[in-house]
Amino acid sequence: MAAPRILILGPPGAGKGTQSSNIADEYGVEHVTTGDALRGNKEMDISDMDTEYDTPGAYMDAGDLVPDKVVNAIVDEALSQADGFVLDGYPRNLEQAEELQDMTDLDVILSLSVAREELVDRLTGRRVCDDCGANYHVEFSPPEEDGVCDDCGGDLIQRDDDNEESVRNRLDVFDENTQPVIDHYESEDAFVAIDGEQTPDEVWADIQDAIDARVE
């Protein structure tokens, strides 16, 4: 099988990170996320782009959003260096989707679908170790001792953006900006809708079937 070029889409809490890791491990491809690409190219020279700062890192250090044209260039660079990839977290809007079309051809476009209230339950129940960063869930993956990390004994906290108001706002932003991206891809032969409300193993089985059916 050739190294597949895969795009995975879905709202916050749909399981993109988990399944992207599965794909990267199973098919030996790079897991490319916007955040990792930005962090890996913080010192990239963008002085020719007529931007406020000369490196992506300067935007990040200032707490400012990195402009789309800079993000596009960084993703393009990351994909060009990868022998196969699963792209997670990009494109976030139709303009980025059009840029991606110029960067590469996609073998598989996976869209994880999960009902809104299920996403709220998943995200508001998430707990993160304040020391080592391990993830838990109060219902689906609780620690052995309430509030204590199994791995390091650190305190488990709820991230500020995992409270209900923030979660619903993040989902509203997704619906406004990124749902049109999914609608844009739906008519393509590479597009596969995946029921993200199944168990993680069932979701993974459907993803493997979709990839194996489309990549020789």
Image (cartoon, grey):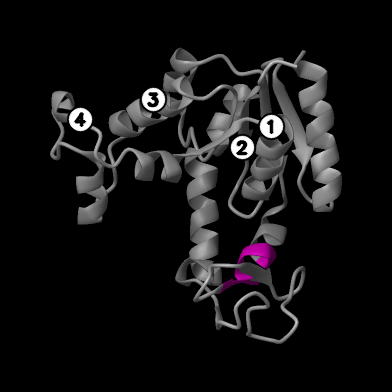
Name the residue at 27% across, 50% down: 60
The tag earlier along the polypeptide, 1 or 2, is: 2
The tag earlier along the polypeptide, 1 or 4, is: 4
**Residue placed under numbered mark 4 in the picture:** 46
Residue extent of the magenta highlight: 121-128
Distance between the alpha carbons at the discs numbered 3 and 4: 13 Å
> Helix, strand, or loop for circle 2?
strand
**Residue placed under numbered mark 1 in the picture:** 110
Q: Is residue 26 above or below residue 172?
A: above
Residue type for callout 1: Leu
How many numbered marks does the figure carry? 4
Residue type for callout 3: Glu
Q: Quadrant of residue 103?
A: top left
The tag earlier along the polypeptide, 1 or 3, is: 3
**Residue placed under numbered mark 3 in the picture:** 77
Along the line of sight, which residue is nearer the eye, 82 or 181?
82
Name the residue at 42% across, 20% down: 99
Residue 139 is situated, as x and y percent measured from the top left of the image, at 76, 73
